[in-house]
Amino acid sequence: MEMQEKIIQYKYHIFFSLIISLVLATLIFLAPSFVTILAYFWPLFLSTALFLVAVVFFGKTSPPATESSGDKAGEGLLDYVAGQSEQVVENFTPE
């Protein structure tokens, strides 16, 4: 009788453990193998690897924008935009 009381006391734990075991066993037997997944996704893996290699290559070979112009990055674009807005502001006369 003691054993049945202990089993009843832990019935949710036992039930949860059985469910988890069944789910894991099902996933192991029904899931595709690693080779199948690799065969399906190899173009994506290859293109991502080539893109990362290109990023590293161009990052090491091209000089940063700050060294070539002597200004902060994007300052030329900001000057261009600010220059156009200054012309508009200069021509504006408040009434």
Image: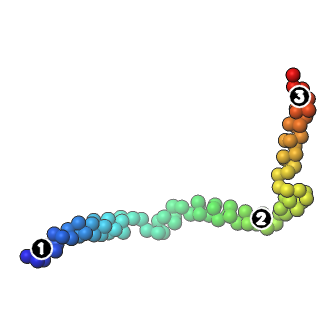
Q: Residue 87 location, x and y as percent? A: 90, 34
Which of the two discs, 3 and 1, labels the residue nearer the N terminus? 1
Q: Is residue 83 above or below residue 18?
A: above
Q: Which residue is mark 3?
A: 92
Q: Is residue 90 above or below residue 4?
A: above
Q: Residue at x 91, y 29 (%)?
A: 91
Horizontal arrangement in the rendering, residue 21 relative to residue 94 (left or right): left
Q: Which residue is mark 2?
A: 59
- Colouring rule applied to residues: rainbow
Q: Residue furthest bottom?
A: 2
**What is the crowding at mark 1: few (fewer than 14 residues within 10 Å), some, or many (at least 20)?**
few
Viewer-nearest of labels 1 and 2? 1
How far separated are the C-alphas under marks 3 and 1? 92 Å
Viewer-nearest of labels 3 and 1? 3
CB within 8 Å, label 3 to label 1: no
Which of the two discs, 2 and 3, labels the residue nearer the N terminus? 2
Q: Residue furthest front?
A: 95
Q: Residue 93 location, x and y as percent? A: 89, 26
* Front residue of this view, candidates 91 and 34: 91
Amino acid carrying mark 3 in the image:
Phe
Which labelled disc corresponds to residue 4?
A: 1
